[in-house]
Image: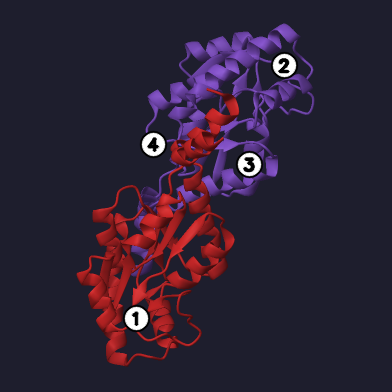
Chain colours: A red, B purple
Amino acid sequence: MKEKTKKKIMEKTGRLFIVSGPSGAGKSTLCRKAIKHFGNLFFSISYTTREPRPGEVDGRDYRFVHGGRFREMIKGGEFLEYATVHGNLYGTRKKDVSDALGRSYDILLDIDVQGAEKVRKKLHGGVYIFLLPPSMEDCLKRLDKRGDVSSKELKKRLKRAMEEIKKSRLYDYIIINDDINGAFERLKSVITAERLREVRMRGEIKRLFKI
Amino acid sequence: MKEKTKKKIMEKTGRLFIVSGPSGAGKSTLCRKAIKHFGNLFFSISYTTREPRPGEVDGRDYRFVHGGRFREMIKGGEFLEYATVHGNLYGTRKKDVSDALGRSYDILLDIDVQGAEKVRKKLHGGVYIFLLPPSMEDCLKRLDKRGDVSSKELKKRLKRAMEEIKKSRLYDYIIINDDINGAFERLKSVITAERLREVRMRGEIKRLFKI
């Protein structure tokens, strides 16, 4: 029995889903919805040095740490990737990802475009999803709604967003977040479809048809 | 304006979705549901020499033709693929596929495993979906329900189905038809996800962000 269980786990392989895109595209909201919806989808919570925004919960949305602690973690080689975004540090802890993969969980990463590039260089076989606002005007509106940036800073962020959008060509899937429910349906489709890939279903076919 | 429209069409490319699998897996029912659900999804109706089953409509489910006419079409090079399945001829007309692609429609083909192999050799870039019954017992039950075959013939078909299931490794996606609504949701996810592929969204991103 134990042997069988072991084999079953080995046939399955946890898959890495990376949701990225410019700030203000709605990555966090979308990822939170996906985690609630799917079983066997583990959310790797990023570490950040920025202050929590109203409503954000430590350990759910981010792990909020001080700059000193973050730098210690960098020195200790604890990050799979880390990057500075708008003056704050963000990082994905290696152990979070390897633990989940070890349990053959699928993992969802919500990371900025720089971070995604680093992960792409380090890990093979991830599914890269680029989330976009429906227009630059909309992106601006979303950034502004948070009310924590000056207009000069806003301009800078928009410019950065444009540069990031050009990177969308490196991604597997594009989701335009014109409406959160529609975008969520599309993300669900991508995750569902990727789980139906032949290589992931092979074990199941063997089990059902003894071939 | 005309130039713009032309360009837009060129940026889009109709995609070929091939649903295949052993007899009795439920391909026709599933494809019919998909066509009803999706816009811009053209169903290429197969030609066949077999008799219509109760409830089947000529021009909707198949184009029912006599053997003589079918052989004429073969001679005229009219088929993209054709194959003999359980003593009857089935074929996909080239013109049906090229017309739809020309209008940049996505096309759905419901074909047997032999036919799918032929299409794979002739056309590039299709999305291959293998539909499976949840077990061999279930497959047998479905074949038997039609009530038009002897038990000897049933055995032969089951053996053939097993051979075909081994070919599932050549496919992109696997859908197990344990329940038609669940299977339909999965097919919807595959079609939706494939339409979100970066290369298909590139034109839309250019249009929205002028990059």
Residue that badge 1 annotates: A65
Residue that badge 2 annotates: B51
Disc 1 and disc 2: Cα gap in Å? 71 Å
Tell which tag, 1 or 2, sits nearer the viewer: 1
Quarter holding residue B66? top right
Which of the two residues, A11 or A25, is positioned nearer the viewer here? Answer: A11
Residue at 53%, 69% in the rendered image: A180
Tell which tag, 4 or 3, sits nearer the viewer: 3
| Label 4–label 2 contact, CB within 8 A | no
Residue B157 at x, y percent in the picture: 64, 14
**Which numbered disc, 2 or 3, marks the residue that appears first in the sequence?**
2
The answer to whether B117 is drawn above or below residue A54 in the figure is: above
Q: Three-letter amino acid code at disc 2? A: Glu
Q: SS for tag 4? A: loop
Q: Which mark is residue A195?
A: none
Q: Is residue A56 left or right of residue B8?
A: right
Residue that badge 4 annotates: B125
The answer to whether A182 is drawn above or below residue B50 in the figure is: below
Residue that badge 3 annotates: B183
Q: Quadrant of the C terminus of chain B?
A: bottom left
> Which chain is indicated by disc 2?
B
**Which numbered disc, 4 or 2, marks the residue that appears first in the sequence?**
2
Disc 4 and disc 2: Cα gap in Å? 33 Å
Q: Is residue B172 left or right of residue B55?
A: left
| Label 1–label 4 contact, CB within 8 A | no
